Amino acid sequence: MKITKRATIYDIAAALNKTPATVSRALSGNTRISAATRKEVTEMAKKLNYQPNVLAHTLRTGSAKTIGIIVPDITNNFFAKIIAGIEEVASQNKYTTIICQTHEELNKEQHAIDTLLNQYVACILFSHSAETAKTGRLEHMQKALSHNTKLIQFDRTNATLNTDCVINDIENVMEEVVRHFIDQGYKRIGFIAGPQEIDIFEKRKTVLEKQLQQFAPSLKLQTTFFDLTRESSRAAARKLLSAKKRPDVILASTDLGALGVWDTAKEMQLRIPDDLALCGFSNEFYTELVTPNITSVNQRGLEMGQAAASIFFERNKDPKAGRSVIVLKPELMIRESTTRK
Amino acid sequence: MKITKRATIYDIAAALNKTPATVSRALSGNTRISAATRKEVTEMAKKLNYQPNVLAHTLRTGSAKTIGIIVPDITNNFFAKIIAGIEEVASQNKYTTIICQTHEELNKEQHAIDTLLNQYVACILFSHSAETAKTGRLEHMQKALSHNTKLIQFDRTNATLNTDCVINDIENVMEEVVRHFIDQGYKRIGFIAGPQEIDIFEKRKTVLEKQLQQFAPSLKLQTTFFDLTRESSRAAARKLLSAKKRPDVILASTDLGALGVWDTAKEMQLRIPDDLALCGFSNEFYTELVTPNITSVNQRGLEMGQAAASIFFERNKDPKAGRSVIVLKPELMIRESTTRK
DNA sequence: ATGAAAGCGCTAACAC
DNA sequence: GTGTTAGCGCTTTCAT
């Protein structure tokens, strides 16, 4: 196998008896260059199969055309969709992306920031890990800001960072959920809440409480918590279902949580939705597959990713624009698991 | 927000009245350095919160401690597991990873190679896209090789590249499948084959045919094809099931394919497994969730990722070692969809 | 054991 | 409009 050395602007310059600076200018669309040289240079570049060395460019300019993405878990369909949305907008703008997973761990998130700062990414789009939320540690994010790297948060956000962000409108969709529950005649609602340090889970809880009080003060609400794993949701469900008067519907803060309830219902031989109705959050792929299929909230991951990336490019055009907070409208997907008719 | 300039070896050198070269040597573990200076340097580095600039290092040395990963789709649980396996081994060895998705498209795969070569990744671990297999275009891979970048293939591989690779032992597990079918008394087997340009799908077909002939020549086999989408699997299933004598079991080449069959069975009001048994490939998360749950082949993504990354690090230690082909043993997960008892 | 100097490939400030 | 020069931060001969 022959090792090819890739062509540099020096090679192009040498071939044309010009200087590297001229070549650089011609290639980068600098205006003060004659049409003739520009043509010569681009042609020679093509002939030599020149490809710019992004590393050198980045080192020199201090910024790469790269967007860093940090998510808790790429296996989660919601995050995978967000990534797809970001990638789409990024590639339209000739930016590349680097994806990092935290697996909900703080130190992996810190490490991800280091990796991305090392790459001089132009900005970092992220949804923080559970541990980050729990510990409230934000030094790594401050560090990114102090290195002049833009931060944009999506889904799970931290208000103290005060960055641009893209979030879901929980108020509206939760109202839909509540009305749907009222509509179906449910009297006792079991709620499996996520870690309250994570803003979205805290909101899901408080908004639910507020709206129940407002629209259906007679409904009973019982709340337990889980740590986002399926196992802990099973435990939470068991707790709710072992009450003297058990709930007739359980709302779980995630679809994996709903799955835990589903497990427990099976275990306790409760039929869904007849004995127990069930609703989740995220509209994961499998909510449509299980029997009965599970009512869930479609959080529009693709749009969220697109929106987050778009904020970055808009801000690039107009750096002085104020903070933008994009609020998307999730959609309640009513399925069999909550439909008794 | 105050912008912090990160410390460089120059800062350390200046603070100690030494040269950058000395600092570099002290930090990189060069032997010809006095214990005293090494101590001084490391302490000052810590004090100044020095973090090496990987870009500069990479540009200078021509190689980064980075592993590039290219997969068709990170949403696919199998590939997500592989990525997790690679990340695990990589981070143990202080390497970072860059993940690229091709969405089964050739031009995205070519672009991914360019991105990774631009990053001077030490090696690229990949499973090629359907379109790459279909078109047989390998120039981008040759290009990587000609830039002296190691390539390691996993799962879907291309023999002409002759690289190290990690694959699944289809022979053994397919024999298990066939014996299981015989065991359950199935007489007519419907097979939904994947694109035959992709080696694993070609193998699944030929091995199945060979083994049926060998172990159960009396069984009837009918084969149709699909393009890896759920929709096309539905069409394939309809074709199989509309035959005068329809199959009593369908083996699909992927789990998504099995899902297509499942859709069609529902549509045609065939009960699984009583009217039609069903088996998939990959052991996706949802195969356990649907009712009845679906028999599938666990392809051990995590181990595959670990193995692929390990090959790279082994080869780094011993560059002259011969080509390694690691063959993993997948596991047949027998579930309700094929069990009539 | 340490310093001096060159260079990875590119861009940008300053000349003319 | 183009050339000259310096430098992003690091490593690596070649000196001594």
Image (spheres, coloured by chain):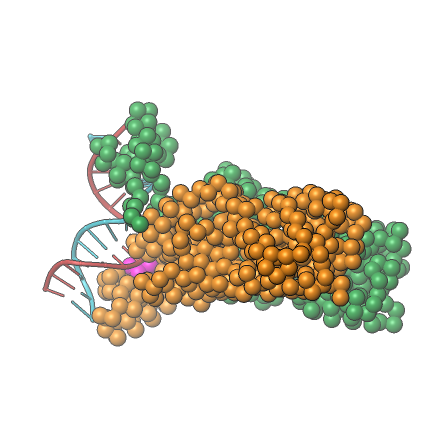
Chain colours: A green, B orange, C cyan, D red
Q: Is residue B193 left or right of residue B163?
A: right
Instruction: Give the residue drawn at x 67%, y 56%.
Output: B218
At which x and y percent is residue B260? 69, 49
Chief secondary structure of the magenta span?
helix
Q: Left of B331 or right of it: where is B54? A: left
A77 drawn magenta? no
Whether A308 is drawn above or below B86: the answer is above
Q: Is residue A59 visible?
A: no
Note whether B151 is above or below C10 in the view shown. Answer: below
Q: Which residues are magenta?
A: B7-11
Q: Quadrant of the image for the C terminus of chain B?
A: bottom right
- Seen at 33% across and 59% down, the residue is B8
- At 40% from the left and 43% from the top, the residue drawn is B139
- Which quarter of the figure has residue A29? top left
Please give the name of the residue rendered at 35% of the width and 41% of the height, measured from the top-left corner. A52
Q: Which one is in front, C8 or B314?
A: B314
